[in-house]
C-alpha cells in the first residue's frame, strides 16, 4: 500500500486536502511541525474520514526524522503545504520565512531524492505574480504572466518553484505540479475544520467572521474608489474544498503520466470569477443573517484593482473546476465560526500522548480542568475515563501508565464497553433467521463484546469543544469508532460515537451506535456502557461507602451469571442506605424499568439511579441514566497491581443482560439498518 | 580584538581576500568545509601573512558548530564566499547547489543574528544579470540592470541577494554589501595561491593554463564571428587580487557607516574594460612565451557578445578600482601554474592533525611516502622531523602522541633548534656595544635558544610541493617562524624558514634565518640546527652502531661544557670506524672547518661528515652539512618514557658552540640587519 505524504497536513488547506485524498482512495501520512497549526485538526480529520491517518510531528528541516517517515511508509508522492504564510509577517521576520519555507523544502527534496520519490504537488500562490496589472492583457492572470513577488512570503514560493523547475531540468523524471492558489476561503461543511484564527486575521473573511462573533469591532474596507461595479477591489475567492480537490486532480494528473515521464507545470487554482470586497461582505452578512459593521478607509499601498485567475489551464488539463460559490464558502465559514469561535483553542484543556511511544499521537490523554479544581481526563483508547479529581481526591480508578491499560489484569478501568456490554449466553444469538456464533471469552459466554471489544480500540477524535455561559463552562468531547460487520462475530457496520459532556461537577456520557445505512446486515445488536470504577473514600478501598439506589430489583441469574428472565429483590435492600464492603458485595443488574426500553433512550429522563457517600469525605456521587438497568459491581474481583478488591465500584448503565437471547427483552438491543442506538449516563460529584 | 569571519576562506577568491584583510590590519577567522578547497591554501595564507589565522572545518549548515565559532571569537562582520560555484555543474545537481548555497546562507544568517553580527559582505556574481544584452543601454552593465539568472548557480546568488535585501528591510541595522564579480582571473603574485584546477576547467584562463603545461591538448574558442574587433566575445576579466581588495573597500565602507546605520547595496566588481577571448589568449601566450594550440568551434548556446561591467559605482562609492591588467593576471597565473602544476594536489602525501584537539589544524603531521617504502613525517611544531622509515625500520626517534612533544622529558626529538643552538656561556653576549642578557635555562648558560626556543613554536606552512622527473620524485616542505626582536632576550626580527627536501632515500634540511630589513636591531645572532636522534639498529638501542667521521677534532670544553677556544682530538679516533655504546659515548662539537665559516654557507659544499652502520641492518646513514661543525651526541641523557639512554644519536650541524662569545668565531653567527643566515644538512639512508 503506497501513501501520499502531506507536509503541513494539519494546516488550513492541508487538512481539507487530506480529507479529499482519503475520499479519493489515497492513503495519507501527515508531517507537520505544528508551529502554526493544531493536532486537533488531525484528530478531526480522522473523526471525519473514519480512518487512522499516521501523523508525525516533524520539522521538515530535520532530515533524519523525515527520512525515518519515508523509510517507515511506502511514500508514492508528496503534497507539500508546510510553510509560513503570512505576507505581513514575512516582511518582519523574513529570515524565518526563508529558513522555514526554503530550508524546509530543500530538506524535503533531499529526503525525497534519497528515497527515490520524485512526485510532488507544491502549494504555491498567486503571490508569485506580484502586481499582474503592470502588464497588458494579464487580467485574468494566466500562468505565463511574469513573476515578480513583492514580499518575502511570495519570494519563498517563487524560489521553491525555481528549485523544482531546475530539479526537473536536471532529472526529467521528476514530476512537479505547481498549484498557484488565489484567495482560499470557507471551511469544511462539517463545521469541524477551518482556518484557525490565531491573532488578528489579515484576510477579509476571517476578519469579517471575527466581527460577526464580536471579537472585532468592524471591518475596514480599504478603498471604495476602484473601477469596479461597487468601487472595491476584485479578487478571486475560492472555496477551500474546491482548492483541496484541485490537489487531487493535479496528483491524478501526475500519476497518469507514462512510466518514467516527468513534468514541471504550473496551474492556477482559482474560480476565474472575480468578486469585490462588497460582494463578499454581502454574501457573508447573508450567511450570518444580519448586516455587519464596516467602515471605508483609504486605499492600502500595493493593492490593485483586479487580481482574478485565468483558470483555463487547470480546467482543461486537470479537468478541475471550482464548483462552490462565495455564498457556499460564507455559509461554511459561519458554521465553522459559530461552532468553533476560537478555532481549535480551548481554555484549560491540554493533552498529552498516552502511549509508550511518545511520537505516536493516536492515543492521547485529554485533560480539562475547572476553576473549582474539578479535573477530568479522557483517553482515546476505549474512549475511556482515566481520571476524575474532585476536591483534590481522585474519585475514579485509572492507570497513570498507558501500558497498564493493555494488561490482562486491567478490570476494564474507565472504558467504553461494546458492541454488547455484559454477557451473551452461550456466546451466540439468533437474528433474522441467522445464528451468530461469537467468541466465548468467559467460560461458555461472551463478555463485554468479546476478545477485541471497544475497550481495546483506539477511538478517533476527540472533537473537543467548549461553551461558556458566564462562569459556566461546559466541555464536550466526541470520540468515534468504526465497528465493522464481522468484528468479534457481530453482524452489521456500526459507527459508535461516545460524547462526553464535562462541567465543573459532572461527567456526562452519551452512547451512540449508528447501524449504518450502508451496512451489509439487516439488523445488529448493541448494548453500550462505561466501566468506570468509582471510589469517593479518599483511600484505596471503597469499604464503608454508603450507597442508596432507586431500585432493589435485580435480574435473577443462574450459576454462569446469566439472567433467568426473572426479576428478584437483591440480598440487601439498597433503596435504603447500605454500607458496602467485604460482607455486602454486589455484582447484579438492577432494573430501573422492568418494561425495558426502546433502542434510543437519549430523550428519556436522565434518572438518578444511585447515590453514594463515604464518611471519609464530603463527596457525594449521583449516577443517572436513561437506560432501563444498571450493573452495580462492587469490585470484588479487582486484581491488578496498585489496586485491590473493592478499590472501586461500578454503576454501569445498560440494557438487560443477555437481552438478545431473552424474547421479551430483545427489542432493547436490536438495531435495524439505518437505526441508531442511544443512551445517556451522568456521574455528578457534589458536596455531601 | 574583533575578527572578520570569512566563509569559504580556503577557496580561490576567499584565500586572496584573507591575505588582503590581514594586509589591511584585520584579524580573520576562516570557516570552510573544504568540500571544494584545500586546507593547504590556509597553510599558505599563514605562510604568506606570517600570522596565525584560526580555521574551522565547519559546514555552514551545521548551525551549532558555526555558533561555537561565533562564541569563541568576537566576530565583527562576515565576508561570505562559501558556495558551490560551477555553472555547468549547477544545472546537473541543482538541489545540492540550493542546499549548500542557500541553506548555508540561511544558517549563517541565523547564527549571525543570534550573535548580533549584522555586517556581511556577500560574494555575488554578474551571473545574476543573466543576458544583459536583452535590454537597451545595459552594456557596460550597471547595478540597476534587471536580474534574470539563467542557471541554478546564478539563481542561488540572486536568491541570497533577495534574502539579504529583505532582512535589511525588516531590520535596517543590517549592513549588506553585495559584490557582483565579473570574471576573476590570475593568481597570487607569490605563486603560492591560485585556483585549484580540479577536473576540467570551465573558464578560459584555467583551461589555457592546462593547455600550456600539457594537461589539455588545445583551447576551444566558441565562436569568432561576434561583432568585436577580433570576432570573439568580450568579457570583463578582473585580477583576483584586485577583486580581493574590493572586499576590503566594501568592508571599510560598511564599517564607516554611522552607528546604527544599515545598508543594502550592490556593487559591480569589474575593470569596466572588456577583453576578447583572443585578447586574453594572446596575453597568456606572451606570459608563457610561446603560442598555444587552439581551435575555433561554433558559438556556445547562451553566449552573448559583450558582458562588461559598469564599475562606476564601486569606483566612486568604494574608492576602489582595478589596477592590475590582464597581462599581470596571465603572468601570475603562469607562475602559479608552473610552480603548482596540480594545484594543491600532491601524490602520496597526506596530513593529519597533530594536536589532541582534532579541530585545531595549526599543528599537523605531514607524511610523504615513496614507491620504495621510504616514508618521512614532519610536523609544524618545531618544524620537526617526526619519523623516517627506511626498509620498514624506523630510523628516527619520535613520538606518536603529539602531547609527548610538550613534555619536559622530551630531549628535543627531531626538532629545529634556534635562535641559537647549543650553549651560550653565561647566558649573555655583547653585540654592537649592547650586552644582551638571556634566560639561563641550563645552569648559568642558555641552551638551545632558551625557555621558548624554536622547538616550542608552531611553524606556519608547510608550503608543500612535489617535483617529478621520470621516476624521481622530490618533495619540498617550507616551514616558517617569525622570531620577533626580544624573544628569549635576543635582538632583532628574524624570519626563520626551514625547507625540507625529501626524496626516496634522503631528508635534506635547509636552515634560513633572515634578519629582516625592518628589524629594530642592527645585528643579531643566529645558529640553527635540527636535533633528530637517529637509530639504524632496528631495536631501541644504538649500542653497536659503527660511526666514522670526517674529523677527529673537537672543541675542547670546560666543566660547564663551554668551549675553551682550543681544538683537541677526541677520546677515540672516530675517523676510523668506531663502535658507540656505553663505553664509547660522545657529546662533543666536532670541527669540520677550523677556520669557521661565513653567515650563509648554503652554497658551500654539502660535505658528508659522518656515516653510520649497524650490524643488525643493512642501512647506512650518511650525514652531510655545509656547516663548519657538528655536535655528535650519542644520547646518554635520553630519559623519556618509551626510550632509554642511547636510543638514538644526533649529528647536529652548526656553527661553533658559544661562537658569539669567542672573538675569532663571532662572525659565524652574527647576522646584520638585511643579511641572511643559511646552512644545509642532509641525512641519506642507503643500503650498506
Image (cartoon, coloured by chain):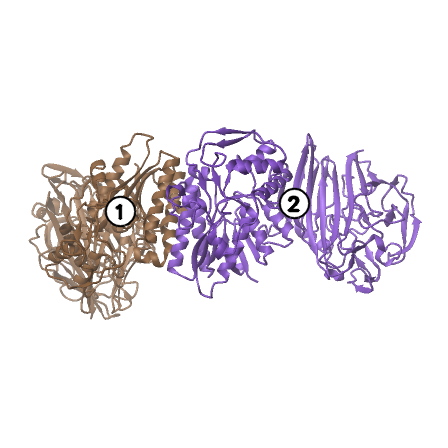
Chain colours: A brown, B purple
Which labelled disc corresponds to residue B496?
none
- Quadrant housing residue B447: bottom right
Return the x and y of residue A470 as percentages of the image width and height: 18, 69
Along the line of sight, the residue nearer the viewer: B149 or A347: B149
Along the line of sight, the residue nearer the viewer: B512 or B578: B512
Tell me if mark 2 has few (under 14), some (14-19) or many (20+) residues whose alpha carbon lies within 10 angstroms of its own.
many
**Left or right: A591, with B442 as reference point:** left
**Left or right: A99, with B659 as reference point:** left
- Image quadrant occupied by the C terminus of chain B: top right
Closer to viewer: mark 2 or mark 1:
1
Return the x and y of residue A416 as percentages of the image width and height: 22, 52
Are dots 2 and 1 in contact, CB under 8 Å? Answer: no
Q: Which residue is mark 2?
A: B463
Disc 2 sits on a residue from what chain? B
The CA distance from mark 2 to mark 1 is: 59 Å
Return the x and y of residue B67 as percentages of the image width and height: 49, 56
Query: Do marks 2 and 1 share a subunit?
Result: no
Along the line of sight, the residue nearer the viewer: B424 or B77: B77
Above or below for A568 versus A522: below
- Image quadrant occupied by the N terminus of chain B: bottom right
**Left or right: A122, with A291 as reference point:** right
| Residue B270 in sight in this render | yes
- Quadrant housing residue A542: bottom left
Label total for image: 2
SS state under label 1: loop
SS state under label 2: strand
- Quadrant housing residue A630: bottom left
| Residue B198 in sight in this render | no
Disc 1 sits on a residue from what chain? A
Q: Which residue is mark 1?
A: A135
Return the x and y of residue A526 as percentages of the image width and height: 15, 47
Amino acid at each position: 500500500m503506497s501513501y501520499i505524504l502531506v507536509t503541513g497536513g494539519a494546516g488550513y488547506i492541508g487538512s481539507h486536502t487530506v480529507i479529499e485524498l482519503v475520499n479519493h482512495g489515497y492513503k495519507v501520512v501527515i508531517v507537520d511541525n505544528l508551529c502554526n497549526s493544531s493536532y486537533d485538526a488531525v484528530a478531526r480529520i480522522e473523526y471525519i474520514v473514519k480512518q487512522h491517518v499516521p501523523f508525525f510531528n516533524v520539522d521538515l528541516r530535520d532530515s533524519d526524522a523525515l527520512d525515518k517517515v519515508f523509510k517507515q511508509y511506502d511514500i508514492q508522492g508528496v503534497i507539500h503545504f508546510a510553510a509560513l504564510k503570512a505576507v505581513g509577517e514575512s516582511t518582519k521576520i523574513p529570515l524565518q520565512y526563508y529558513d522555514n519555507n526554503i530550508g524546509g523544502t530543500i530538506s524535503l527534496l533531499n529526503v525525497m531524492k534519497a528515497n527515490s520519490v520524485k512526485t510532488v504537488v507544491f502549494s504555491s500562490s498567486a503571490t508569485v505574480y506580484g502586481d499582474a496589472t503592470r502588464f497588458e492583457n494579464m487580467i485574468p492572470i494566466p500562468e505565463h504572466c511574469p513573476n515578480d513577488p513583492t514580499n518575502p512570503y511570495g519570494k519563498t514560493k517563487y524560489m521553491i518553484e525555481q528549485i523544482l523547475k531546475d530539479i526537473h531540468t536536471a532529472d526529467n523524471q521528476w514530476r512537479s505540479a505547481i498549484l498557484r492558489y488565489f484567495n482560499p476561503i470557507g471551511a469544511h461543511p462539517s463545521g469541524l475544520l477551518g482556518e484557525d484564527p490565531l491573532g488578528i486575521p489579515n484576510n477579509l473573511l476571517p476578519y469579517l467572521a471575527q466581527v460577526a462573533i464580536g471579537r472585532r469591532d468592524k471591518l475596514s474596507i480599504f478603498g471604495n474608489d476602484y473601477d469596479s461595479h461597487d468601487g472595491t477591489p476584485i479578487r478571486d475567492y475560492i472555496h477551500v474544498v474546491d482548492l483541496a480537490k484541485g490537489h487531487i486532480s493535479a496528483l491524478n494528473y501526475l500519476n497518469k503520466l507514462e512510466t518514467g515521464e516527468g513534468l514541471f507545470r504550473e496551474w492556477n487554482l482559482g474560480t476565474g470569477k472575480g468578486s469585490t470586497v462588497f460582494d463578499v461582505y454581502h454574501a457573508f452578512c447573508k450567511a450570518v443573517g444580519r448586516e455587519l459593521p464596516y467602515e471605508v478607509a483609504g486605499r492600502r499601498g500595493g493593492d490593485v484593482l483586479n487580481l482574478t485567475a485565468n483558470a483555463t489551464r487547470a480546467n482543461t488539463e486537470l479537468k478541475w473546476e471550482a464548483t462552490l460559490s462565495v455564498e457556499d464558502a460564507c455559509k461554511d465559514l459561519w458554521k465553522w465560526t459559530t461552532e468553533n469561535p476560537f478555532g481549535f483553542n480551548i481554555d484549560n484543556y491540554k493533552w498529552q500522548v498516552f502511549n509508550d511511544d511518545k511520537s505516536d499521537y493516536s492515543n492521547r490523554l485529554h485533560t480539562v480542568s475547572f476553576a473549582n479544581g474539578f479535573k477530568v481526563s479522557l483517553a482515546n483508547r476505549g474512549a475511556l475515563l482515566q481520571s476524575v479529581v474532585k476536591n483534590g481526591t481522585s474519585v475514579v480508578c485509572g492507570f497513570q501508565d498507558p501500558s497498564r491499560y493493555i494488561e490482562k489484569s486491567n478490570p476494564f478501568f474507565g472504558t467504553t464497553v461494546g458492541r454488547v456490554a455484559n454477557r451473551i449466553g452461550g456466546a451466540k444469538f439468533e437474528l433474522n433467521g441467522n445464528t451468530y456464533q461469537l467468541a466465548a471469552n468467559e467460560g461458555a459466554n461472551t463478555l463485554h463484546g468479546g476478545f477485541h471489544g471497544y475497550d481495546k480500540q483506539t477511538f478517533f477524535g476527540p472533537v473537543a469543544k467548549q461553551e461558556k455561559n458566564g462562569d459556566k463552562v461546559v466541555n464536550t468531547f466526541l470520540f468515534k469508532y468504526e465497528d465493522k460487520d464481522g468484528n468479534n462475530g457481530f453482524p452489521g457496520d456500526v459507527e459508535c460515537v461516545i460524547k462526553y459532556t464535562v462541567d465543573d461537577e459532572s461527567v456526562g456520557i452519551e452512547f451512540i451506535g449508528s447501524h449504518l445505512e450502508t451496512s451489509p446486515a439487516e439488523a445488529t445488536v448493541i448494548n453500550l456502557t462505561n466501566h468506570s470504577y468509582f471510589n469517593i473514600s479518599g483511600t484505596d478501598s471503597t469499604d464503608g461507602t454508603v450507597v442508596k439506589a432507586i431500585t432493589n430489583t435485580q435480574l435473577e441469574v443462574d450459576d454462569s451469571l446469566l439472567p433467568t428472565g426473572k426479576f428478584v429483590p437483591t440480598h440487601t435492600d439498597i433503596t435504603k442506605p447500605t454500607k458496602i464492603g467485604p460482607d455486602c458485595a454486589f455484582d447484579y443488574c438492577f432494573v430501573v424499568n422492568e418494561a425495558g426500553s426502546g433502542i434510543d433512550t437519549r430523550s428519556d429522563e436522565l434518572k438518578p439511579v444511585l447515590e453514594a457517600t463515604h464518611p471519609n469525605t464530603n463527596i457525594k456521587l449521583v449516577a443517572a441514566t436513561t437506560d432501563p438497568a444498571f450493573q452495580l459491581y462492587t469490585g470484588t474481583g479487582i486484581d491488578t497491581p496498585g489496586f485491590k478488591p473493592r478499590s472501586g465500584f461500578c454503576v454501569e448503565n445498560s440494557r438487560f443482560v443477555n437481552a438478545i437471547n431473552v424474547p421479551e427483552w430483545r427489542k432493547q438491543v436490536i438495531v435495524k439498518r439505518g437505526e441508531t442506538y442511544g443512551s445517556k449516563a451522568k456521574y455528578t460529584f457534589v458536596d455531601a
